[in-house]
């Protein structure tokens, strides 16, 4: 078999571990210590543009992101809750040119005993260690919570369903 | 079973239970509502994400 050009699958997993750095403006990291990631809930909106919705254009956590406010209510702390991260990113090769680096929070994200009367449908995962920089936006059916618990269970941590996947094809 | 409500902790036997669910390609969601005399006093929600909605965050192409 001939050699094949490809981005190395191991590199995909290492990107999620901050192993490589191509920038001279990178933040300091502590060896063998993961950053802290948090999950904040945002209200549902009928807006549609990239500047008025939570979407790929989000760069960091804020109480209002792209004009959309974070939820507020009894029992909810601004900024959300810490994401449990007990499983390091993984990289799995699938062919001579393709592979996937992936990561999923290791436990459900839980907001215990809250009252959130304004409908919400979005969670923003962000890095609270690195200047609150945004990681990803995930949406679900619009919900409210009354003196109850909101639980967000993660998909399986696999090449096909992990919450975060970096892949080559 | 005792649950938190807007009226304080209450036994579910005293409340009307109205569960619900939603199932689609992205999520499986269930909720439990408890009502007292026509008033919603407790609503908990459990969203299970089936998979990330974006299939690939990154694709490499080398010319």
Image (cartoon, rainbow, N blue to C red):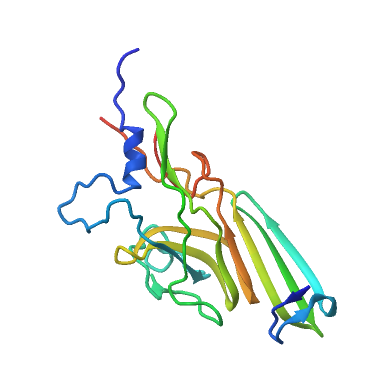
**Looking at the picture, how far across and down is residue A93, in whole percent?**
42, 30
Q: Residue at x 35, y 58 (%)?
A: A35
**Vertical order, B60 against B30 (above or below):** above
Q: Hey, which residue is sitting farthest left in the picture?
A: A24
Q: Residue at x 29, y 49 (%)?
A: A18
Q: Hey, which residue is sitting farthest right in the picture?
A: B13
**Looking at the picture, how far across and down is residue A15, in whole percent?**
32, 45
Quadrant housing residue B34: bottom right
**Looking at the picture, how far across and down is residue A16, in whole percent?**
35, 47
Return the residue nearer the eye: B53 or B41. B41
Q: Residue at x 35, y 12 (%)?
A: A1
Looking at the image, how many numbered discs can be counted on the residues?
0
Return the residue nearer the eye: A105 or B56. A105
**Is residue B58 toward the left or the right of residue B15 in the image?**
left
Return the residue nearer the eye: B15 or B8. B8
**Is residue B28 toward the left or the right of residue B59 in the image?**
right
């Amino acid at each position: 078999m001939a050699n094949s050009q490809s981005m190395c699958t191991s590199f995909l997993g290492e990107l999620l571990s901050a192993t490589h750095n191509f920038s001279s403006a990178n933040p300091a990291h502590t060896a063998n210590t993961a950053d802290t990631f948090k999950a904040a809930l945002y209200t549902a909106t009928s807006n549609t543009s990239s500047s008025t919705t939570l979407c790929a254009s989000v760069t960091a956590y804020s109480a209002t992101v792209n004009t959309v406010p974070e939820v507020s209510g009894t029992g909810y702390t601004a900024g959300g809750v810490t994401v449990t991260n007990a499983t390091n990113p993984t990289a799995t090769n699938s062919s001579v040119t393709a592979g996937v680096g992936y990561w999923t929070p290791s436990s459900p994200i839980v907001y215990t005993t809250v009252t959130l009367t304004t409908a919400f449908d979005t969670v923003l995962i962000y890095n609270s260690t690195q200047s609150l920089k945004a990681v990803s936006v995930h949406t679900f059916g619009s919900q409210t919570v009354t003196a109850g618990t909101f639980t967000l269970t993660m998909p399986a941590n696999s090449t096909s369903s992990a919450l975060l996947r970096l892949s080559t094809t | 079973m005792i649950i938190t409500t807007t009226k304080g902790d209450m036994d579910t036997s005293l409340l009307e239970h109205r569960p619900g669910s939603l199932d689609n390609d992205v999520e499986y969601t269930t909720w439990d509502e408890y009502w007292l005399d026509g008033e919603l006093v407790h609503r908990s929600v459990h969203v299970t994400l089936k998979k990330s909605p974006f299939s690939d965050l990154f694709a490499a192409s080398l010319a």
